[in-house]
Amino acid sequence: MPGFLDKLEKGFDAVKDKLLHEDDERQQQQGAYGSGSTNNGPHNNGGYDNSSSGYNQGYGQQPQRDQQNVNGPFSVPFNNTTIPAECKSCHANSKPLMLWTHGAGGGLHDDATQGFANGFAELAPIVVHEAQSNLEHRVACYRAVADHERYATYLGGRSMGSRTAATVATSHPETKAVVLVSYPLLNNGEERSQIMLDLPEHLDVLFILGSKDPMNPCRQFEEVRKRMKARSWVCIVHGAAHMMDMVHDHATKDMRRQTGRVAAEWLTNRDPSRRFMTIRMKEGKAVPGPWEENDRPEW
């Protein structure tokens, strides 16, 4: 186990160094970050540009979060207000490995958000942010946070937040992977598959889904997934519903934390030949199984 953990930590360090190098190169090419924008701040355009022209529209001049104080809450300028956000990290002075947001009706400090983020942060830094329920507004918020963090490589979210992350990823080729937790394929029985189908082929996608989630029936999900251009991996959480909630509260807490750990591990060490895994409760603990070569996940 110590050897595995050492290997995993080295993998995270390698990814972090690579991302820092890519950021430095991009900033050298662009000069001052966001210099391509004709706006000087968030108030000049009456709101964030929702077009696919890039994260830097209108927010390139905003100050960065203090990198010497990685952990904890901070805010991102947005229109005439700010977006509440929080960085969780087990590594000092590290850029986030992933940006992530909550589902509709949730928030920055709800149990589902904190459970996933805390599990992820055991292995790698993550930034989570607040958003409202309107998808268009959520996409604008997500882009503002990504611009503020100067980061857009790995994105993710839960439920409606996963739709937001996927929407942002489709218009930004620098995004390499997305983590979609409890993706809501159905809305009042109506299938919403276009965002999944629009994900580009260069993108890697991890779905983390509850086996008892009524918003993502296994048969319909598999039919849509087979039509996707993007490569996809699937983690099935046995016995979990849409909120990753289990029968007992302690099981729910551990399961949410474990899904965050699975996501962090997958981002730095994924095998294209092994794309399916399950997490099961065993003796009161959430236990992830190995990644398998199955043609489809066991629901």
Image: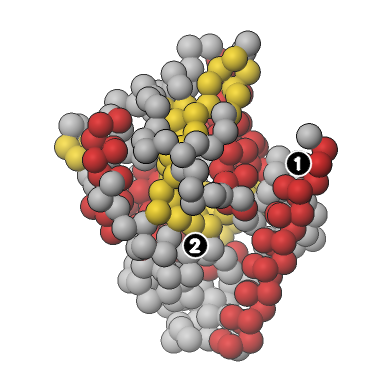
Residue 4 seen by the camera: yes
In the rendered view, would you say 92 is above or below 190? below
Tell me: 89 left or right of 166.
right
- Report helix, strand or loop for mark 2: loop
**Closer-to-camera residue (224/107):** 224
The residue drawn where x is 44% and y is 30% is 236
Badge 1: few (under 14), some or many (20 or more) residues near its Cα, within 10 Å?
few
Q: Amino acid at mark 1?
A: Phe
The answer to whether residue 36 is above or below residue 133 is below
Label 2 packing within 10 angstroms: few (<14), some (14-19), many (20+): some
Quadrant of the drawing holding the C terminus: top left
User: Which of the two labelled residues, at mark 2 and mark 1, occupies the earlier sequence position?
Assistant: 1
Name the outermost residue toward the right. 2
> Residue 135, position in %: x, y?
32, 51
Residue positioned 40% across, 32% down in the render? 297
What residue would you read off at disc 1? Answer: 4
The residue at which mark 2 appears reads as: 176
Q: Between 200 and 75, which is closer to the camera in this rendering?
A: 200
Query: In the visual, does 18 lie left or right of 42?
Result: right
Q: CA distance from mark 2 to mark 1?
A: 25 Å
Amino acid under disc 2: Lys
| 176 vs 142, nearest the viewer | 176
Task: Determine the secondary structure under disc 1.
Answer: helix
Question: Residue 27: image x %, image y %?
Answer: 61, 82
Given residues 105 and 80, the one toward you in this image is 105
The reply to whether discs 2 and 1 touch (Cβ–Cβ < 8 Å) is no
Q: Residue at x 53, y 68 (%)?
A: 147
Residue 277 in percent (x, y) is at 49, 34
